[in-house]
Image (cartoon, rainbow, N blue to C red):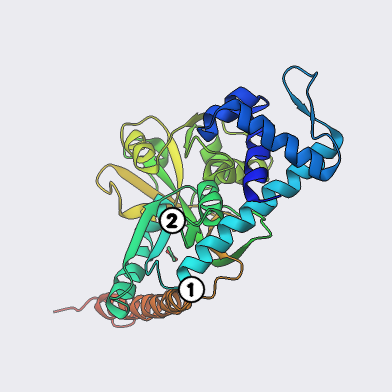
Amino acid sequence: MDFRHLKYFVAVAQERSFTRAAERLYISQPPLSRQIQQLEEELGLLLFDREARPLALTEAGRFFYGRAVRMLEQLDESIAMTRRLSQVERRLVIGFVPSTMYGALPRIARLFRSRKPQTPLVLVEKTSVEQVEALKAGQIDVGFGRIRFDDPTLKREVLREERLVLAIPGEHPLAAESGPVSLAQAAAHPLLVYPRKPRPSYADHVLSLFRDLGLEPAEVHEIQEMQTALGLVASGMGLCVVPESAQKLRREEVVYRTLVEPSATSAIIMSTRLNDQSEDIVLLRELIDEVYRLQAAEKIEAERKAAASAPSALTGPRRS
Ligand code: BEZ
């Protein structure tokens, strides 16, 4: 038995048809049937119920299917890691959800390029769900996402919990006031959530923030991308809950208000393959801390400057 047998078996089990599996594998059907037969002979049991329409797995076949999928995933992971370790693939591929581009990611990427110019850095946009599959298949080395997924082959770390804000059309009654607003106030108006798919996504996280408080938004519209959702907010179509770093966008047309609920946050999660401790990944993790330290120092400095330039309450206005 070799990995080809497992690959063929998984394809037939997923397609529930020898014909479709053969098409997917770009081979003809007779050699595919022979390989599955060989596998069954070696195991001494039947993996498929050939009388069933569509083709079905036997009980033993269902058990073996789960194991075969895991073995193939482990093989993909081992190939990706071996390539990285052997330096054949001296590049670091990062998958990211779009909203992280408004946070610390560009600065981290710039620092990485300057500290490690010999490692080409590649950035590819991927949803949190897509990052899981891409990590396992060795297509990316690091994922920055917002949704927690449990996978025994991946390591995940919450880097920080980012505050969420409510994006409001400029002409909307909720935009007339400043200061914090509540999810209960937001729930009474049409709500735009993103991305539409794949699920579960940030959209489900936002909806569960409402539902955890016993709230059901009056009207929900699913949008594929954050940028489009904010464009629709600017057009007056509804409200949208976004990470605070997105406040840089559409500032002339959209009003952003902080959400009062302490639960209104979204995690920024770094995911890697479980045993990938490559130099590049270790460096990337160190640079994230460095950027966080720089940002904290800059914030303190900006607050100090703002306090210094504000009119002093103690001195009061000067009389002439
Ligand atoms: C952040 O904004 O905290 C962040 C974004 C992407 C990668 C790492 C950190």
Q: Residue 157 vs residue 306: left or right?
A: right
Q: Which residue appears farthest toward the left when viewing the image?
A: 320
Residue 92 vs 238, above or below: the answer is below
Residue 273 vs 229, above or below: the answer is below
The image's mark for residue 95 is 2
What is the quadrant of the C terminus in the image? bottom left
- Dot 2: few (<14), some (14–19), or many (≥20) neighbours within 10 Å? many
Residue 241's spot in the image, x, y percent? Answer: 47, 45
- Where does label 1 land, which residue? 85
3D distance between C-alphas at marks 2 and 1: 20 Å
- Dot 1: few (<14), some (14–19), or many (≥20) neighbours within 10 Å? some
Instruction: Report the residue at 71% width, 36% height from top.
Output: 36
Instruction: Report the residue at 39% width, 43% height from top.
Output: 226
Residue 89, quarter of picture: bottom left
The image's mark for residue 173 is none
Instruction: Report the residue at 33% width, 65% height from top.
Output: 121
Q: Is residue 160 visible?
A: no
Residue 29's spot in the image, x, y percent? Answer: 60, 26
Q: Is residue 289 visible?
A: yes
Comparing 227 with 140, the one in front is 140
The amino acid type found where label 1 is placed reads Leu
Instruction: Report the residue at 36% width, 40% height from top.
Output: 230
Q: Residue 147 vs residue 211: left or right?
A: left
Residue 284, quarter of picture: bottom left
Residue 223's spot in the image, x, y percent? Answer: 44, 33
First in sequence: mark 2 vs mark 1: 1
The amino acid type found where label 2 is placed reads Gly
